[in-house]
Image (spheres, grey):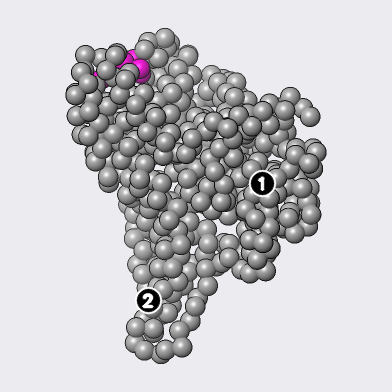
């Protein structure tokens, strides 16, 4: 086995023994942030508890926006025309290595354009690929396939669904007085970000995951081994696409629920507004219009109101982890922000920066803080002002700094399991089953990211 493959296996074995449930991960980080704030700032024990509570409910609006991204993305992924296409594509790989490569490209490309849609599409695709491999007796290592599906989360923050970029492009954002409004044409739609995306999506991530594919069939754990052979055989005999479930009753309510006219009218109104929005505002994406686009697309593709209701119902359990854990991470944000700990950490990192090295320092800063605040927008809300101000002081374009920060935020997603919650629900695995492979990718990708941030033209 090659060095990357052997190292990935060892990290996977370590992860299976030691990686806690994502909720416990959040609780452990809460204790760490509490202690660091107590020791490194002038805040006392009770002050830190107050900061924790004050932050607990601060980001409920943003949390709802994140839930909508995930739920509307999931509903779109299981829509007619989308899910059948994924199942057809999943039949194409003929070898374990091809299964990994196909999953990597689906994950990275879809997630680059929309992190919520990409996360769910990749998770569904990984399960379908594993089932097809099981049916054809191809030795697909299911934990690696699921980990590969999660790797798209290392591409999203330099794509159109960038939280920091979209927030900074929204008029009236919290840092407008510091660096103004930065259109995404100056951040993720620059050659700097696009070259980084091409490198990660098409080269670094797929090849690294492919190199970790077990060569020995005895080392492969199939989807049947992980989830139960009877379960997978039953799934292979039945369709997992959300069905219409037509009613025998022909009452007024049934006519409304199954009316394509209603859905298409809602969809038409939505399309009209979307056209109006871009005609009047140009390429000015933000979280609200992004969610609106995917909601309207789901309404149209599901064709009837009741079908879309069922799709959203199917998608909603995947957001349970966000609903439970986001307040805890908001509490961590409160402790880090209100105590001054974020400023200490960020200023310490950025104190080493020059104009040339600033993107790399911003990347590392974003990576470290992301472990404690695994929300690109929430994290940017805490440290974005400092990054933006120092960027201006050094003469570095703020848009470039947003991209560099985004690279750090998405880079340590391979260590932070928070955003894997929905994927784990779909694949039926535990965080500990996949995170070893993700950590290996994080290590391998580091020098490539540093190279791109330093040398790619802006």
Give the vertical position of 291 relative to 413 (above or below): below
Residue 110: x %, y % from top left: 55, 48
Q: Earlier in the sequence, mark 2 or mark 1?
A: 1
Is there any visible trace of residue 402 in the rendered image? no
Front one among 149 and 272: 149
**Left or right: where 12 falls relative to 395:** right
Residue 261: x, y in percent? Answer: 40, 78
Q: Name the residue under label 1.
A: 142
Looking at the rendered image, the disc whose residue lies closer to the viewer, 2 or 1, is 1
In the picture, residue 11 is in which quadrant?
Answer: top right
Q: Do the residues labelled 2 and 1 touch (CB within 8 Å)?
A: no
The residue segment tinted magenta is 340-347
Note whether 457 is above or below 223 in the view shown.
above
Q: In this view, does 177 lie to the left or right of 276?
A: left
| Image coords of residue 19 (percent x, y) | 52, 33
Q: Residue at x 31, y 44 (%)?
A: 62
| Residue nearest the observer in this picture, 144 or 278 | 144
The label shown at residue 262 is: 2
The answer to whether 127 is drawn above or below residue 369 in the figure is below
- The local secondary structure at tag 2 comes to helix
Pick whichever, 197 or 445, lies toward us.
Answer: 445
The N terminus sits in image quarter: top right
Instruction: Give the Cα distance between marks 2 and 1.
Output: 41 Å
């Amino acid at each position: 086995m090659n060095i990357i493959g052997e190292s990935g296996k060892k990290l996977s074995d370590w992860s299976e023994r030691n990686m806690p449930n994502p909720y416990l991960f959040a609780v452990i980080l809460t204790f760490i942030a509490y202690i660091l704030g107590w020791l490194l700032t002038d805040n006392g024990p009770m002050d830190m508890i107050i900061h924790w509570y004050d932050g607990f409910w601060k980001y409920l609006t943003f949390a709802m926006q994140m839930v909508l991204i995930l739920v509307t993305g999931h509903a779109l992924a299981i829509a007619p025309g989308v899910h059948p296409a994924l199942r057809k594509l999943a039949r194409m790989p003929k070898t374990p290595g091809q299964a990994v490569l196909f999953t990597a490209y689906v994950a990275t490309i879809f997630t680059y354009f929309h992190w919520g849609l990409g996360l769910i599409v990749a998770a569904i695709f990984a399960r379908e690929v594993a089932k097809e491999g099981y049916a054809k007796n191809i030795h697909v290592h299911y934990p690696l396939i699921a980990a590969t599906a999660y790797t798209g989360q290392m591409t999203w923050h330099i794509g159109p669904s960038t939280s920091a970029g979209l927030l900074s492009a929204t008029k009236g954002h919290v840092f407008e007085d510091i660096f103004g409004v930065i259109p995404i044409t100056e951040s993720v739609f620059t050659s700097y970000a696009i070259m980084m995306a091409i490198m990660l999506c098409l080269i670094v991530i797929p090849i690294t995951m492919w190199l970790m594919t077990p060569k020995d069939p005895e080392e492969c754990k199939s989807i049947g081994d992980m989830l139960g052979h009877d379960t997978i055989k039953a799934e292979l005999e039945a369709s997992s696409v959300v069905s219409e479930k037509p009613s025998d009753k022909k009452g007024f309510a049934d006519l409304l629920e199954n009316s394509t006219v209603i859905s298409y009218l809602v969809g038409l109104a939505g399309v009209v507004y979307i056209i109006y929005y871009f005609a009047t505002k140009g390429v000015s994406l933000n979280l609200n219009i992004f969610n609106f686009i995917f909601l309207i697309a789901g309404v149209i593709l599901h064709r009837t109101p009741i079908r879309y209701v069922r799709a959203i119902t199917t998608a909603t359990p995947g957001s349970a982890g966000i609903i439970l854990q986001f307040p805890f991470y908001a509490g961590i944000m409160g402790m880090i922000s209100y105590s001054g700990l974020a400023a200490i950490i960020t200023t310490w990192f950025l104190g080493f920066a020059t104009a040339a090295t600033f993107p790399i320092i911003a990347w590392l800063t974003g990576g470290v803080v992301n472990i404690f605040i695994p929300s690109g927008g929430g994290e940017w809300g805490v440290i974005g002002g400092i990054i933006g101000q120092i960027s201006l002081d050094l003469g570095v374009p703020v848009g470039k700094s947003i991209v560099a920060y985004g690279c750090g935020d998405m880079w340590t997603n391979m260590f932070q399991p928070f955003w894997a919650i929905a994927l784990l629900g779909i694949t039926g695995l535990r965080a500990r089953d996949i995170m070893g492979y993700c950590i290996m990718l994080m290590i391998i990708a580091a020098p490539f990211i540093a190279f791109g941030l330093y040398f790619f033209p802006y």
